[in-house]
Image (cartoon, rainbow, N blue to C red):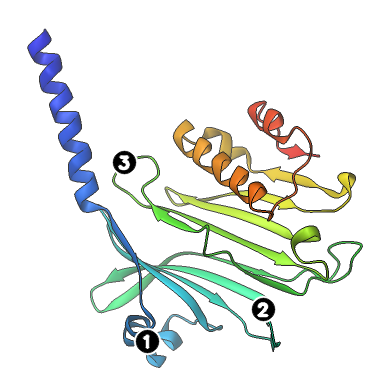
Amino acid sequence: MRTFLTAMFIIAISGKQLYAQQVKSEILSPGATSTIFTDDVVKQINLQYPIRRVYNYQDQSGTYYLVLCESIDEIRKDDTLHQKINAVNLKKDGNSFTKTWELKDFINSNNASDGQELSIWFWTRFCEVKDLDGDGNIDPLVIYGSSIGNGYDDGRIKIILNYKGQKIAVRHQNSTMDEGRHIQVDEAFYALPQSIQSHIRTLMRTLSATGFALYPHGYEKAMAEQKLLIR
């Protein structure tokens, strides 16, 4: 029996090592991005906004490119403002690409008491392209947010996980007023493996610690109770 359990342990470890070898990801350089995403390719896959960043990743299901695009609507001395964003996930299929999923968003013209949102953009500092549950497939985690006249304080934050073909979101509204803050959690979030739930909760704490997020009081307890709307 002990020999059997030892063999099973070795097989499990070997499987994890094999998955680790199959899973790779990188951020493309501007040069590599322009070489792969030529004008013809951009037209073919219908990218409507300038490319901000491209992640190339490989897992046991194939080779992919996650392309983050942002419109450029105003260039200021200290900032560039974006009204629309688009993320497109592409699977390499020979010499062409197949779109597997995408997301779109735009500034909200009636978001908070402070007025219209000024800009929306991908928070690439926090985006991740990793295998979060160790099953040999990448689970892209895209984070973006918006700003108003007072910066992040009344803006929105969205955490979007693509897991096994399903987009699962945690949406948060910042506010300088306690009653203005709320979090919306997709029901599917609570069905995710605990390791992924913990990973996203850690990310949420990081967003708070770095000054990007102002959450409702007691939100962690509410998430532990699997609440969908937290105020």
Name the amino acid, label 2.
His
The residue pinned by badge 1 equals: 34
Distance of label 3 from label 2 (alpha carbons): 36 Å
Q: Secondary structure beneath disc 1?
A: helix
Q: Give percent across and percent down for residue 15.
A: 19, 37
Residue 149 at x, y percent in the picture: 83, 71
The residue identified by callout 3 is: 135
Q: Is residue 91 above or below residue 140?
A: below
5 or 206, nearer to the observer = 206
Q: In the image, is 20 to the left or to the right of 128?
A: left
The answer to which image quadrant residue 78 occupies is bottom right
Q: Which residue is mark 2?
A: 82
Quadrant occupied by the C terminus: top right
Where's the N terminus, which quadrant? Answer: top left
Q: Which amino acid is tagged 3?
A: Asp
Q: Is residue 172 above or below residue 33?
A: above
Write the residue at 52% across / 62% down. 125
Q: Residue at x 39, y 82 (%)?
A: 30
Q: In front of the other: label 3 or label 1?
A: 1
Crowding near pointer 2: few (<14 within 10 Å), some, many (20+)? many
- Give x and y (percent) for residue 87: 52, 69
The residue tagged with tag 3: helix, strand or loop? loop
Please tell me which residue is depicted at 87% across the width and 61% down the height of the picture.
112
